[in-house]
Amino acid sequence: MLQITGKKEFRAIVRFVYSFLKNKFFNGRVYFRIGTQIDGSFSNAYFISSEKGVYLLENKSIKKLFSTHTFGMAIDDQSIFLACSNDIETFIIKCDKKKLLKGSFSGKKIFCKYIADPGSRIHQISLSKETLWITCTFDNTIIAIDKNTGEIIKKLAPFNDEFGVPILNDHN
């Protein structure tokens, strides 16, 4: 079993994963985020989200769970939340964690926005108890939704123009 005792070991793992993915799967282009460890503690199993799909890194092997353009991941006891995107929409999928680990993808779209271009999308997500926080470039906001229903709880607009008016469109 892999034991992580500090930041130095964790950084070494991240460098290894980056190098492995870059050379083995993505022909030199890779963007990924190591998600929360599966059991919530430091262990030897990690979910990895990337623009080529979602992978499980476990016991010195890597397994592709499914293909989708993924830009963030949040995990709780029963579910995995994925921020995904295609050419016309950006969305959050709620998946059953146990089924996903067994290779069966069953998910439900709980939040969706149609987009004008692929750059206008959800970029990252974070889970805090019952609330899923979403950073969005399609309208330059941070949105809080209920993790079960997808209902919008709060919408924050942190960027203002020179007159103090919130910028609520993609200005990339």
Image (cartoon, rainbow, N blue to C red):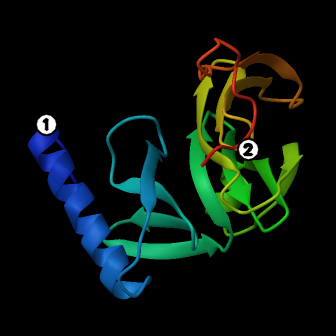
The residue drawn where x is 84% and y is 30% is 148
Can you see residue 56? yes
User: Label 1 belongs to which residue?
Assistant: 6
Residue 70, horizontal then vertical, whole percent: 62, 59
On the rendered structure, is 96 left or right of 61? right
Q: In terms of depth relative to the viewer, which is nearer, 79 or 29? A: 29
Mark 2 is on which residue type?
Answer: Phe
Q: Name the residue rendered at 13%, 48% in the picture.
A: 9
- Measured in 3D between alpha carbons, the distance from the residue under mark 2 to the one under mark 1, in whole angstroms, is 37 Å
Image location (x, y in percent) of residue 65: 61, 70
Tell me, for residue 91, which label it has, or none: none
In this view, 71 is above or below 151 = below
Q: Nearer the viewer, residue 16 or 123?
A: 123
- Does residue 30 lie above or below 115 as drawn? below
Q: Which residue is mark 2?
A: 138
Q: Secondary structure at mark 2?
A: loop
Relative to 145, is 40 on the left or the right?
left
In primary-sequence order, the first of circles 2 and 1 is: 1
Q: Is residue 1 visible?
A: no
Q: Amino acid at mark 1?
A: Gly
Count up the numbered dots: 2
Mark 1 element type: loop
Q: Rate crowding at label 1 as few (under 14), some (14 to 19) or many (20 or more) other CA atoms within 10 Å.
A: few
| Relative image position of residue 158 (x, y in whole percent) | 60, 19
Q: Can you say which quadrant of the picture contains the N terminus?
A: bottom left
